[in-house]
Image (cartoon, grey):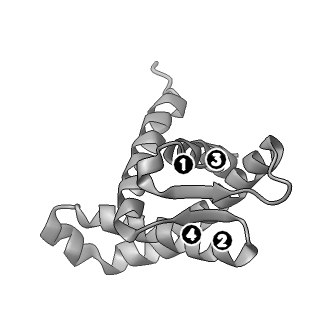
Amino acid sequence: MRFIVRVVVNAFAIWVVTLIPALQVTVTPFAPGETLQLVLTLLLVAAIFAIVNSVLGTVIRIVAIPLYILTLGLISLVINGFLLWFTAWITSFFGFGLSVGDFWWGVLAALIISVINWIFGIILRPKEKRD
């Protein structure tokens, strides 16, 4: 259930990022390109992004612990941009999916996606019961 919520929130965040034309991030839905195909493409891209972030992102974050300390955590912006770019690279093989114009636009898009995920994480976090 938690993975599904994460995928839906990521899909929404990717959709928000694609609405900003200056970021050069687009989603190409599979044919014929109707609204349902766009939603399904966003969900598929978000699922791939969540898997890449969970598997590859964890490995990179463990290896880059000294860089996190050295840059006071700012390297996470570059790592998140790389993971978004890598997701776009994976989806390019399918003929539909995510495309990122430039790596640094991907870093900015990943920052916006992270902020949206953080906001939804606060909203959707289960409340603790106090006795």
Residue drawn 82% across and 44% down?
36
- The quadrant in which residue 115 appears is top left
How far is the residue under mark 4 from the one under mark 1?
15 Å
Residue drawn 41% across and 50% down?
22
Q: Which mark is residue 127?
A: none
Q: Dot 1 corresponds to which residue? A: 18
Q: Dot 3 corresponds to which residue? A: 2
What kind of residue is marked 2? Thr
Which SS class for mark 4? helix
Q: Dot 2 corresponds to which residue? A: 91
What kind of residue is marked 4? Thr
Mark 3 nearby-residue class (10 Å; few <14, some 14–19, many ≥20): few
Q: Which mark is residue 87?
A: 4
Q: Name the foreground residue: 96 vs 126.
A: 96
First of labels 2, 1 by sequence position:
1
- Disc 2, disc 4: CB below 8 Å? yes
How far is the residue under mark 3 from the one under mark 4?
21 Å
- The quadrant in which residue 12 appears is top right
Which SS class for mark 3? helix
Mark 1 nearby-residue class (10 Å; few <14, some 14–19, many ≥20): some
